[in-house]
Amino acid sequence: MLKPLMFLFGAVALIALPHGLSFSQQEILVFLVINILLVTSYRLLTLTGEWSLGHVVIMGVGAYASALLTKELGVAVPVAMFLGGITSALLAVLLSFPLFRMKGFYFLIGSFAAGEIIRLIWKRFREPFGGVRGISGIDPMPDFSLGFYSFDFFEPVSYYYFAGVIVLACLWVLWRIEKSPVGLTFHAVHWQDKLAQASGVNLRAYRTLAFAIASGFAGIAGALQAHYVGTVNPNSFDIEVMVFVLTWAIVGGTTTFYGPILGCVLLTVINEIVLRGMGFEQARPLIYGAIMILSILFLPNGLESIVQKFLPRRSTAKSDRKAEA
Amino acid sequence: MLSKYIASGFTRRTFLKTSAAATAALGLPKMALAAGEPIKIGFLAPLTGAVAAWGKPGLDGCEIWAERVNAAGGITLADGAHPVEFVSYDNEYDPAKARTGATKLIREDGVSFIMMLGGDTWPGVQPVAERTGMLFSTLLPSDLSPDSKTLLAPAEVHPIYNVTGVEWLAQNKPELKTAVMCAQDDALGLPSVATYLAAFEAAGIEMLDEPLLFDPATTDFAPVVTRLLAKNPDIICLDTCYSDYVHPIAEQLFQQNFGGQIISCTADFYDQMIAKTSKEFMEGFIFQFPDFDDPALNAETVNFEDPNGFYAEYNKRHPGQWGAVSWEYASIMDLWKAAAEKAGSADPEAVITAMQDGPGKHAFGDAEWWGEELFGINNALVGDWPVVAIENGKAVIKEFRSIPDWYSRHGDLLIKHMQAYGQMWDQRS
C-alpha cells in the first residue's frame, strides 16, 4: 500500500514541480531532465568497468542524426528521436571493434580520440553536418492537444512533461536491464572478469552490449536536446561538457542507480540556480571547482554514500520496532 | 476523480500559464514604464570560459556608460526621464544556456533590449526572439539573416572591417608580398578567413598556403607556428583568433625568431604580449581595435562621447583589462539611447524603427544600414573603421578607412571567398 502511495506522491510532485519554478528555472529543469538520462546511461557503461570520454559526442551523434532526419528527410520528430538513439547505438557497435581491443586507461584515451574524430567529421563536412556552425533551425516537436492539456513545445513546461515521460521510460528500461541477468553479467565483467570468462561469458560481447545500450540512450538524450534548443554544433559536445558528466557521476557515485542522478541534480542546482541567484555568476567555475574538491575529499564514495548511510539505519530502526512489538 | 481533478487543474493552469506567457511574450517589452522606473537592458554574453574576453570587458564598459548616462539625467522618453540599469546573464557561449538567459531576461527581468556577442549562441536564442519580438544586438553580423528581423549588428561588421588593415598594409608597406594565415576552426574564425583571403587577393598579396585551421581545443601552438613559418612568409595573419590563442601564437612566433609582419583582428591585452615577447618584436603589429585614449578619437566625426575619459575611467576600475569589446557594447547603447529618445519609448518595435530611420551614428562616424548582399538583410551599420598599429609599446590609430568604399571595389571577391567557406547567409543551415 505504501509503495503505490509513494509512486503517486512522486508522480504528483513531478507534475507540479515546474509550476513552482520561475521561467528560467523551468528551462533549466528541461536540460536537467535530459542530463539525467545522459548521466544514467553513462553509468550503465561504467558497470562493465570502462569509463569513456566519448559519451557526450555519442549524445551528439543522436542529436545530429535526429536533426538531419527531420530536416533532410522529413521524418516525424518523435520517430527521428528514436532513430537518433538507434544511430548512436549502431555507431557504438562500430566503434567497439577498435575500442574494445583496449581496456582501462587505454580505452579512456581511445574513446576520447574516437569522439574527437567524430567531432572533426562534423566540422570538416559542411554537407550535411553544417561545419563549425552546425545545424540550426531544427524542427521543434510539433504542438498537440490532449484535450485537458495543450502542448506548446516552445514552453519549457510542455517540453518538460514530454521529455520527462521519455526519460522516465528510458530510466525504467535501464533499471530493468541492470537488474536482469544481463546487468548482473555486466557487474561480473567488471569485478570478476576472469571468473566470468571461465564460466563462458564473452567479455567483449558484453562490453559491446553495454556500450551500445548506453550510447543508444545518450543518443535519445541528444535528440531531446536538439529538438528543444533548435541547434546543434560540434562545440556543444566537446570535452568540457564531458567533464561535467564525469563530475556528476563521480560526485554522485556510481555504485547505485540513483548516485549519478543525485550528482547531476545537486550540482546543476548549485551551479545554475544557487550560485547565479546569489550573484556569484562570474565566480561560478571557481566555487563549483571548490565544491567538487571538497566533496571528493570528504565524500570519497559520492553523495550516494549519505543516502546509503541513512537507508540501513531506517531499516534497522524498523526491524527494532518489529522486534519490540 | 483524480483525472477530473488533474484535468480541471491543468485547464486552469494552462489558462494562467498561457496568459502569463502571452503577457510576457507580447506585453512585457511593450509595457509602459512607470515614471522614473529604471529601463533594464539585458547583457547576454559569455562572462566565464574561453570566450569571456569578448563578454566581460563589455559589461564592465556598460556599467561605466550607465553611470555616466544616469548622472546626466538618464534616458528621456515621452513619459519623462528614466535611469538605466544592466541585467547580465553568463551564457558560457552555449546555445542552450543562451536560450535560458534570454527567457530569464525577457520574462523575469522585463528588459527592453538585449545585447549579445552572438556566434554559436544566437541559434539557441533565435526562437525566443521570434516569439517575443524582443530587440537583440550582436557583435557578429554573420548571425544576421532575413529570418531575424529584430537582430541588429550596430557596433561592428565583423569580420568585414579586417579588409581595412590589409589595405593599409599593402599601401604603406608595399614590400610585403606573401602571407600565411591561421585561425580556429569555428563560427568566428571561418568568415574572418574568407574576409582576409579576399583582402589579400584585392591587395595583390600572395597566399603561400591554405589557411591553417586549428581546433578550438588546441593548447600547444608550437607545431602551428612551425608550419606557418615553413613557407617563409612576409606576413603572418592571425585572423580572428581569441586572445587565448593570439598570445601563445605571438609567443611562439617570438621564440621561433619570426621577424616579419603580424596582422590580426584583435590584440586584446597587448601589454601582456609585449611582456611575454619584446617591445621590438611587437612593433608594427597591425590590428583593428584602438585604445580609447587615442587623440584621433577626439575628431568631430567620432560619435562616442568623451572616449578618452571613458578609457581613463575603465582603466582606473579594471587596470589591464581593456579589450576589443570594452567600448563596443557601450557604443551600441549610445545608438539605442538615441533611438529610444527619438521614439519616446523603450518598446522594441518603436526603437528599431527609429534606429533605422536614416544613417546611424556609429562610434567611428556616420554610417549606413547595410548588408543585404552578404547577410540577406540591411541590419548591419557600416562606415569607417580604424587601422591600429603598435608603436613603441602602445596602440596607435594609423588611419580610418571606409568599409563601404572597399566593398564597392572588391565586393565580388568577398562574396567569392565567403561562398567558398559556406559563410553566405543563404548557405548557413
Image (spheres, grey):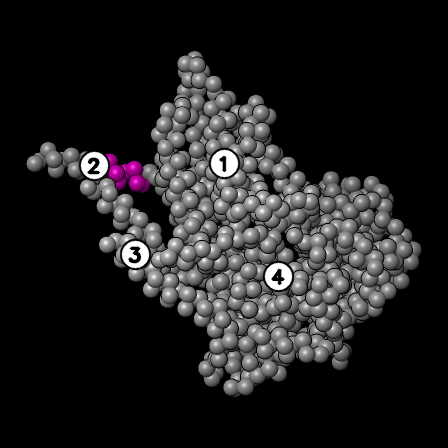
Q: Amino acid at mark 1?
A: Gly
* Residue B39 screen position, x and y as percent: 51, 76
Residue identified by numbered label 1: A216
Q: Residue B6 has which mark?
A: 3
Q: Residue B117 has which mark?
A: 4
Looking at the image, is B63 positioned above or below residue A23? Answer: below
Disc number lying in front (3 or 2): 3
Tags 2 and 4 in contact by the CB under 8 Å rule?
no
Q: Which residue lies at the image location 47% right of the left edge and 84% below the top edge?
A: B35
Q: Which residue lies at the image location 21% right of the left edge and 39% below the top edge?
A: A314
Q: Which residue lies at the image location 50% right of the left edge and 36% below the top edge?
A: A216
- The chain to which mark 2 is attached is A
Q: Residue A315 has which mark?
A: 2
- Please identify the dominant SS of the magenta region: helix
Q: Are marks 4 and 1 on the same chain?
A: no
Q: Are marks 2 and 4 on the same chain?
A: no
Q: Count residues near mark 2 (Cα–Cα under 10 Å), then give few for <14, some for 14-19, many for 20+.
A: few
Disc number lying in front (4 or 1): 1
How many angstroms separate mark 3 from mark 2 (CA)?
A: 35 Å
Tags 2 and 1 in contact by the CB under 8 Å rule?
no
Q: Which residue lies at the image location 60% right of the left edge and 77% below the top edge?
A: B351
At mark 1, the secondary structure is helix
Looking at the image, is B101 positioned above or below residue A319? Answer: below
- The chain to which mark 3 is attached is B
Indicate whether residue A309 is drawn in magenta: yes
Magenta range is: A306-313
